[in-house]
């Protein structure tokens, strides 16, 4: 289904947006795209919608009718997962450059210009930038989750969440690349319901390409609004990371291995503590060090943001990320070893 401006002009850039039930944020994304310094006549927006059941399409239709200078098309993503949404968008794209964004994001006004500039300069095959993570809801917990999701203790060495230095990296969020790249390395892997970006970037690097992170390329990303939503998100991340590593074991990084190893260590020492006082001492020491580290981070963030509630909100959020990711990773490994299915 096509909606909005259906001009036959050929844009230079196609912005691909996977989308499902995003009535709360899709308007902000479109407003951010409408405000781009890049000429409106030179790009289109292709929204790959998983048959939204809320008012997402109504919001898109209304915005398109009131901003007809921006070419917006909506296509159906019948498979209703992110990699299939991206692939459908790429296939429908008219531009020679693909810029992937998320319905939970809002790009800075120079986002497209900086992406195209870097690609035209031949710096790398895929170019991405910095997430400015904002709360996805109201209240202390939502604000704490946003802080935790951009803190190195929560996300390790994921530069795009906190770094202000340009560098060649393993992966970037969203990303921008020439459409011809998929002819070389293939489309996004639709068997991975999460971690599809990392897997795509891994194939780029294995083919001799490079991934470039530039913190001047900025977008606002809205974190999950509650601990339950955060736990679900990081469960998906951990589960599908293990599945991806089955094909690319060499891409495993220390930050990804720490949560499952910590959980295994806790399980072993907890079991041994039933019969050994030494194991009990080790268990208490492990938990004490971990909790103390979280509390120190929480206290610092509470002072920095002048919000006392972050003293507990940030530690709980980081722990939720660690335990959800680590347990899902281990569960996925167990399921692969036992051959008991491919679903989380």
Image: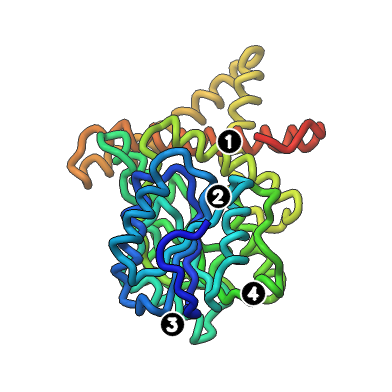
Please report whichever mark, 2 or 1, sits nearer to the chain's N-terminal start.
2
Q: Is residue 132 visible?
A: no
Tell us which disc is closer to us: 1 or 4. Answer: 4
Q: Does residue 6 sit above or below 267 in this rendering?
A: below
Q: Position of residue 253 (x, y in %)?
A: 61, 54
Dot 1: element:
helix
Query: What whole-number distance in Å separates the C-alpha atoms at marks 2 and 1?
Result: 11 Å
Who's the residue at 37% across and 54% down the image?
A: 61
* Marks 2,1: beta carbons within 8 A: no
Q: Do the residues under discs 4 and 2 have CB atoms within 8 angstroms?
A: no
Task: Identify the residue at the far left of this view.
Answer: 306
Spatial distance from mark 3 to mark 4, Cα to Cα? Answer: 17 Å
Residue at image location 42% in from the left, 53% down from the top:
103
Q: Cα distance, mark 4 to mark 2? A: 29 Å
Query: Mark 4 against mark 2, which lies toward the viewer?
Result: 4
Pointer 4 local density, CA inside 10 Å: few below 14, some 14–19, many at least 20: some
Marks 3 and 2, the one that precedes in the sequence: 3
Which residue is at 43% across, 74% downward? Answer: 43
Whole-Å distance between the Cαs marked 1 and 4?
39 Å
**In the image, 242: left or right of 110?**
right
Image height check: is 24 above or below 275?
Answer: below
Reading the image, the residue beneath label 2 is: 255
- Lower sequence index among marks 3 and 4: 3
Residue 168, position as x, y percentages in the image: 53, 72
| Label at residue 76 | none
Categorize mark 1 by other alpha carbons within 10 Å: few (<14), some (14-19), many (20+).
some
Tell me the tag on residue 117: 3
């Amino acid at each position: 289904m096509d909606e909005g401006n259906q001009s036959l002009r050929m844009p230079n850039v196609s912005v691909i947006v996977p989308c499902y039930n995003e009535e709360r944020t899709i308007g902000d994304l479109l407003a951010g795209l409408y405000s781009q310094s890049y000429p409106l006549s030179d790009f289109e927006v292709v929204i790959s919608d998983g048959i939204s059941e809320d008012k997402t399409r109504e919001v898109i239709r209304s915005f398109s009718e009131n901003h007809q200078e921006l070419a917006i098309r909506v296509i159906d993503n019948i498979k209703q997962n992110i990699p299939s949404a991206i692939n459908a968008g790429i296939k429908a794209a008219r531009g020679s450059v693909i810029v992937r964004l998320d319905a939970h994001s809002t790009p800075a006004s120079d986002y497209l210009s900086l992406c195209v500039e870097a690609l035209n300069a031949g710096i790398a095959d895929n170019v991405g930038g910095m997430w400015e993570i904002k709360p996805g809801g109201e209240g202390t917990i939502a604000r704490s989750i946003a802080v935790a999701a951009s803190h190195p203790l929560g996300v390790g060495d994921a530069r795009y969440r906190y770094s202000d230095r340009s560098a060649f990296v393993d992966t970037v969020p969203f990303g921008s690349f020439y459409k011809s790249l998929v002819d070389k390395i293939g489309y996004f892997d639709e068997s991975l319901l999460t971690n599809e970006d990392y897997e795509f970037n891994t194939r780029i690097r294995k083919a001799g390409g490079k991934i470039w992170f530039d913190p001047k390329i900025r977008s606002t990303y809205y974190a999950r609004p509650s601990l339950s939503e955060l736990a679900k998100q990081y469960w998906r991340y951990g589960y599908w990371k293990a599945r991806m590593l089955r094909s690319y074991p060499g891409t495993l990084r220390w930050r990804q291995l720490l949560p499952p190893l910590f959980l295994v260590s806790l399980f072993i020492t907890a079991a041994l503590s039933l019969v050994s006082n030494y194991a009990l001492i080790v268990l208490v020491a492990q938990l004490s060090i971990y909790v103390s580290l979280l509390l120190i981070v929480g206290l610092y963030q509470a002072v920095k943001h002048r919000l006392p509630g972050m003293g507990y909100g940030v530690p709980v959020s980081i722990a939720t990320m660690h335990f959800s990711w680590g347990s899902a990773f281990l569960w996925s490994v167990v399921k692969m070893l036992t051959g008991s299915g491919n679903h989380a």
